[in-house]
Amino acid sequence: MTSNLRRYSDEGLSPSTGSANKPHFFKIICSTVLGDGKLGIPKRFVRIYGKILSDTMFLKIPNGAVWKVGLMRGDDEVWMQSGWQEFAEYYSIGYGHFLVFRHDGDSTFRVLIFDKTASEIKYPSTNDQHRQESNANIGGSQPIILEEFNEASSVEILDVFPPVRASKKTGALRRALSFKAQNPFFIITMQLSYISTGKNMNIPLRFVKRYFTTDNDKTTLCVWNRRTWSVRYQARRFDAKFSSGWAKFASDNCLQVGDVCVFELIKPSANLLKVIIFRK
């Protein structure tokens, strides 16, 4: 029995138990998964159950949310790719997290997410979450938002787990979290998808709706030396992001994976944000 359990563990499979003998597999999140932006399905699961895998998987979370994820195939391997990064970012899935996937019929898999303490995470409410039903199109998502409000209810914090080990981000994030301001601000941890050439960056939708007052979809970023950059933002139904102009700001300021930026709204009438950069 022990050898059988070891075999299942090595191959990322869970032995069938009393839950209607539905096939399971699990994945432990490592640094290569975070860097690649895709998640491989265990090869033995693919060999045995490959026929149940279409070009799309629907990941069903215990709170009822359903996320649509596209599959990529190569040789005898299958990866979750399109939509996986957004799913991982939303639930702050990082290094050392443990995910269990159970096939629930058709292309639907029920997913349980455990953090590094081996405890199941607290799932966000579906009222606040980007929800993807089975007949929805693959789309973007709103990143996980950790909110802290001072007495004036002016502080919003956004923390997306970057594709680096936690030990490398702790210092910069700790310094950013200790930042004090009289104006509304949010904090974002840089990851590869935010600083690559031509990339956009997700920002808190609630912050945009609450504090951006102009109708021209533009904001201005400035740093300590008073140089400014014009950046366009896009606010959609479920998410918001910096688009045109963001890549130049990131390049000009030499932003790196793991750096943490504080965006403080110093002039609401002009959507003017002062950016304080905490290097990793």
Image (tube, helix red, strand yellow):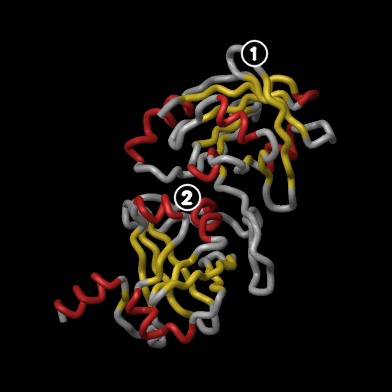
Residue 236 visible from this viewpoint: yes
Residue type at mark 1? Arg
Q: Earlier in the sequence, mark 2 or mark 1?
A: 2
The crowding category of the residue bearing disc 2, from other C-alpha atoms within 10 Å (few below 14, some 14 to 19, many at least 20), is some
User: Which part of the image, by quadrant, shows the C terminus?
Assistant: top left
Q: Of all residues shown, which one is farthest toward the left?
A: 2
Expressed as whole percent of the image width and height from the top left, the position of residue 89 reads 51, 51
Position of residue 39 relative to residue 209, above or below, is below
Residue carrying label 2: 92
Judged left or right of residue 256, residue 218 is right
In three-dimensional space, the C-alpha distance between marks 2 and 1, rounded to whole angstroms, equals 33 Å
Expressed as whole percent of the image width and height from the top left, the position of residue 72 reads 50, 69
Residue drawn at (56%, 62%) of the image = 82
Residue 183 visible from this viewpoint: no
Residue type at mark 2? Ser
Viewer-proximal residue, 34 or 175? 34
- Judge depth for marks 2 and 1 and give the one in front: 1
User: Which part of the image, by quadrant, shows the N terminus?
Assistant: bottom left
Residue carrying label 1: 226
| Res 78 quadrant in image | bottom left
Viewer-proximal residue, 194 or 235? 194
Position of residue 74 relative to residue 88, above or below, is below
The crowding category of the residue bearing disc 1, from other C-alpha atoms within 10 Å (few below 14, some 14 to 19, many at least 20), is few
Secondary structure found at label 1: loop
Residue drawn at (41%, 87%) of the image = 20
